[in-house]
């Protein structure tokens, strides 16, 4: 990494961090503890557990890139002089994201999330389902309270609802892939796009809709979010094999060990690698090195890297619809960061 | 039942039946089979299993009571000359109802619904959660497509979102009551109101919002729905004890046998009846008669009947905000039917 790259990455992280604090304060206001206590505690559980708040940060950054200078997110200047509460939209998007986490952890039987117990483990199955449903309802509720022109709020809500439908479709594909004989890398990318990336797309498109941007701009920003979000997920698969365990925060190769399908293993399988035999039950570090060498030799890690690079490049070009500004540069750097981060 | 009552009941049933067929055709259009096939089949499962479609029928009937004569629900005359697709709103409300059924059956570990296997039994837990989430998203999506004035659509969506939050709160209370030492009849009624009746309220209020009725009318219709919906649920508890098994379609006293809390058992317990000892494991018909006598003696069945009657009376008075019409009379008869039906 060059000094320039390092500086840009530091700037991106600082920009997200600053907005995260404001988002957290807004969530506290919009989703206060309430009755029945247990339901609201469960709904807040994953939010309090942490999280990068990338999606709400994206909502705020896109607003800034469109609406010019302002740090009052609750009364942000729209393109035709009206005031829009983009913070409430940002919180709405984060609640929708949190709803998907609560329900996904049930389906995937995951015990931990954000370093804490998953909602269905900390509470129980019923409460986790209900907490997700509550976050879902609250997310839509907030989207009706942004103060933007009613027809724009309506368009934003429709986009969010469509996005939620796509997310369900993606999660269903993910579940089905567990039982499928063969999944192609392209099918996997489509699943990732539906399950994860469309919400990045919505996070980028919704502020543009609310502030009154034209359709071309909205669509370009949506694509920026979808492409950089897909690249982000692909990069996760690459990280698992290429970053030392101590830096990654979990064992290198754990996807391989757990038999998880990734774009890399799917590509390797498609190219004749016996992926299931790459590692035995208790591999030494040298066995993992050998497995990674085998995946390199099949071109599978490069394949994933190239897909992530292509998507990121394309996503940055989408930003041409925005006026030149520091924030636009930051959005481009954010896309780069998503596929260059080391954990 | 007098001849007049019988005639009114027949008219109500016919009115609901006619609208049910149209609602079913509209659902077929708005929630067609799609990819991934399994997700959409699961989402349609409970809808195809049947159901009375009371809530969408209520949406259509309220529209008719407000908007005058028309049978084109897709372009229904609003109060100030605009055209509103109230059928799409009706379908949206039914999808939200169906989402709550799919998730509730998981939480309550119910195997059957509408004479068919519950979604999580016919498919699996993950698919049932996702099918519910898909119906949730589609319900909101449809509410953005009614063609009403945007600010009215926005208000309707906000009401529906708030209603969904209330439903989650009610379901949480229902789950918590299972483990509570003591639940008062009033607490139970509040739970029923949140879990079930608010969606009747929304079904009555939403068409009024969309067609442009004033706030007083909207609020009165909401109360009409909430009160008659609460009475409907209380009547279910009464039916279980007072209607012979063959007419009820399930064994008389099955709530008592299963140890289910109802407004009747809660009242009885509050008044010193040892409810758990009313029936042993394999009671004869005469034992059930004796248990019912005991509940009558404690005034518990009368208590439930009176609450249902009071709520129904009050709900019918709410209809005074509507202009006099045949449909208004039908809405009053519908409230009566809900607490006089025998199954």
Image (cartoon, coloured by chain):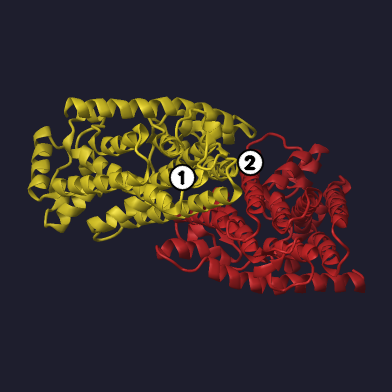
Chain colours: A yellow, B red
Label 1: chain? A
Q: Quadrant of residue B208?
A: bottom right
Residue A188, labelled with which disc? none
Comparing B209 with A273, the one in front is B209
Left of A332 or right of it: where is B171? right
Q: Is residue B98 above or below residue A300?
A: below
Q: Is residue B144 left or right of residue B308?
A: left
Question: Which residue is rendered at x = 26% and y = 44% of the image?
Answer: A312
Q: Is residue B256 visible?
A: no
Q: Residue at x 67, y 70 (%)?
A: B20
Task: Report in which chain the residue with disc 2 lies.
Answer: B
- Picture coordinates of residue B217, whole percent (x, y): 80, 52
Is there a contact, CB below 8 Å, between mark 2 and mark 1? no
Left or right: residue A26 versus residue B183 is: left
Q: Which residue is mark 2?
A: B169
Say the numbered circle drawn on residue A208. Answer: 1
Horizontal and vertical percent position of residue A60? 45, 35
Q: Nearer the viewer, residue B125 or A228?
A: A228
The answer as to whether the residues below labels 2 and 1 share one chain is: no
User: Is any atom of residue A73 visible in this view?
Assistant: yes
Distance, label 2 to label 1, CA atoms, is 33 Å
Q: Dot 1: few (<14), some (14–19), or many (≥20) neighbours within 10 Å? A: many
Q: How many marks?
A: 2
Q: Disc 2 vs disc 1: which is toward the camera?
A: 1
Helix, strand or loop at label 2? It is: helix
> Quick one: SS at disc 1?
helix
């Amino acid at each position: 990494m060059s000094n320039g790259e390092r500086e840009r990455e530091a700037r991106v992280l600082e920009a997200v961090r600053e907005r995260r604090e404001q988002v957290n304060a807004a969530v506290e206001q919009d989703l206060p503890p309430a009755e029945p206590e247990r339901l609201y505690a469960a709904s807040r559980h994953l939010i309090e557990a942490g999280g990068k708040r990338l999606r709400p940060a994206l909502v705020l950054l896109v607003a800034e890139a469109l609406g010019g200078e302002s740090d009052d997110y609750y009364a942000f200047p729209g393109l035709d002089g009206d005031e829009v509460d983009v913070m409430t939209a940002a919180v709405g998007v984060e609640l929708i994201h949190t709803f998907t986490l609560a329900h996904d952890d049930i389906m995937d039987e995951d015990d931990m999330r954000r370093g804490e117990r998953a909602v269905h483990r900390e509470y129980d199955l019923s409460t986790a389902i209900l907490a997700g449903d509550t976050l879902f309802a609250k997310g839509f509720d907030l989207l009706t309270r942004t103060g933007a022109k009613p027809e724009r709020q309506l368009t934003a809500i429709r986009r969010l609802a469509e996005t939620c439908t796509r997310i369900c479709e993606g999660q269903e594909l993910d579940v089905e892939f567990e039982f499928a004989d063969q999944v192609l890398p392209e099918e996997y990318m489509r699943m990732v796009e539906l399950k994860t990336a469309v919400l990045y797309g919505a996070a980028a498109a919704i502020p543009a809709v609310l502030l009154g941007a034209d359709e071309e701009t909205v669509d370009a920003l949506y694509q920026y979010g979808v492409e950089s979000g897909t690249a982000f997920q692909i990069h996760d698969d690459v990280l698992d094999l290429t970053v030392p365990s101590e830096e990654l925060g979990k064992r290198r190769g754990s996807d391989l060990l757990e038999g998880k399908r990734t774009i890399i293993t799917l590509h390797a399988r498609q190219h004749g690698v016996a992926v299931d035999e790459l590692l035995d039950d208790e591999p030494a570090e040298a066995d993992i090195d050998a497995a990674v060498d085998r995946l390199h030799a099949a071109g599978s890690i490069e394949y994933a890297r190239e897909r992530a690079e292509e998507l990121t490049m394309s996503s940055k070009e989408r930003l041409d619809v925005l006026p030149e500004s520091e924030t636009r540069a930051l959005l481009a750097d954010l896309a780069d960061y998503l596929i260059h981060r080391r954990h």
